[in-house]
Image: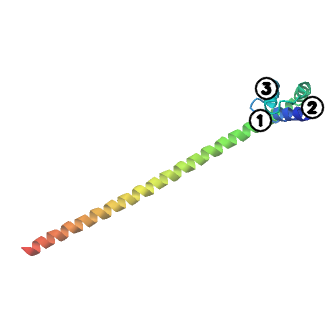
Amino acid sequence: MSRGPTLVILYWALFLRHEKWNDIGALADYLKTLYDLSTPNLEMVQSIIDNNQNFQNQQRLRQEEEDEARRAKIMKMDRMNQLKNMKDEYERLKRKRLAEAEAEKSRLQRVKFAEDEALRKW
């Protein structure tokens, strides 16, 4: 039995730092894939986790709150990005309409000038 791997598994389980934090066997298997010579004391890990169940529950609640805050922040950023895109599209359409209005005004001036020229020639 070695202390290092035991502490690593204990950290992963107590602080919910691994996706399989509630399965000590899976944590031990994962640790063995990283370092095949590891020999964690799984009985001690289970004993400490059982004694600190309240702490683990607090960590779970804290993690859920952080996840919710992260999701809310992402949604807010998405809404801000959508709003920015809508404003950009509005400005683009506004510029396009102004350009079209200027082009129409210029065309009407050319038509009027051509009509005036035609009248002068008569």
- Can you identify the residue that label 3 sits on? 26
Q: Amino acid at mark 1?
A: Leu
For mark 2, give the secondary structure.
loop
Mark whose residue sits in front, 3 or 2: 2
- Can you identify the residue that label 1 sits on? 61
Residue 52 placement, left or right of 89: right
Coordinates of residue 120 in the picture (x, y in percent):
10, 75
Quadrant, the C terminus: bottom left
Give how far apart the Cα atoms at labels 3 and 2 are.
Answer: 18 Å
Coordinates of residue 18 in the picture (x, y in percent):
77, 34
Coordinates of residue 46 in the picture (x, y in percent):
88, 26
Q: Residue at x 15, y 72 (%)?
A: 116
* Towards the viewer: 46 or 66: 46
In primary-sequence order, the first of circles 1 and 2 is 2
- Can you identify the residue that label 2 sits on? 2
Q: Amino acid at mark 3?
A: Ala
